[in-house]
Amino acid sequence: MITAAMLSLMRDSCMNALILVENVEEAEFRRSRLTRAEVRKHYRTVAETARNLEPEVRTALAKIDWPGWARVLAALDAGDGDEQSAVVWEAIRLLGPATLTWLRVYPKIHPELFEMKPFAG
């Protein structure tokens, strides 16, 4: 059940970040401290959750770019400079949408990872 909750959190955080930057160009994103801070918060949630997933789960969901999320987390930890903003922008344009797509596909392939069921003990 914890895996399902973690994957749901990743999906929701990706979606929230993408909603924030819908129709936003890179220059506007870099100028907007508020939007940048909120997107960074959502992507930190995704990246930290990805890091904390069991290795077996990451292996089962192999099409998700797990090393990409590790790079995003490293950039977020490094601050909010131009280089870090470039990594976050790449995540906005490529990594986030791809991850969101796979988190919509994988429940059909591995439903057991996405099932929220109460503890039977």
Image: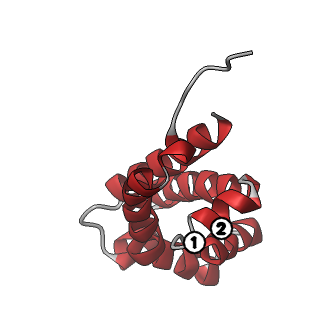
At 53% from the left edge and 30% from the top edge, which residue is drawn? 116
* 49 or 81, nearer to the observer: 49
Q: Residues within 10 Å of mark 1 (few under 14, many from 20)?
A: few
Q: Is residue 10 left or right of residue 52?
A: left
Which amino acid does the dot numbered 1 rest on?
A: Ala
Residue 4 rendering spot, x and y as whole percentages = 57, 40
Which amino acid does the dot numbered 2 rest on?
A: Thr
At 54% from the left edge and 72% from the top edge, which residue is drawn? 88
Q: Residue furthest left?
A: 23
Numbered label tally: 2
What quarter of the picture does the C terminus occupy?
A: top right
Q: Is residue 113 left or right of residue 31?
A: right
Q: Is residue 26 left or right of residue 70?
A: left
Location of residue 55 with respect to 3 vertically, above or below: below
Q: Which residue is mark 1?
A: 62
Residue 2 rendering spot, x and y as whole percentages = 66, 36
Q: Secondary structure at mark 2?
A: helix
Location of residue 82 with respect to 3 vertically, above or below: below
* 30 or 60, nearer to the observer: 60
Q: Report if the CB atoms under discs 1 and 2 are less than 8 Å apart.
A: yes
What quarter of the picture does the N terminus occupy?
A: top right
Q: Secondary structure at mark 1?
A: loop
Residue 93 rendering spot, x and y as whole percentages = 39, 75
Q: Residues within 10 Å of mark 2 (few under 14, many from 20)?
A: few
The quadrant holding residue 23 is bottom left
* 10 or 4, nearer to the observer: 4
Q: Which residue is mark 2?
A: 59
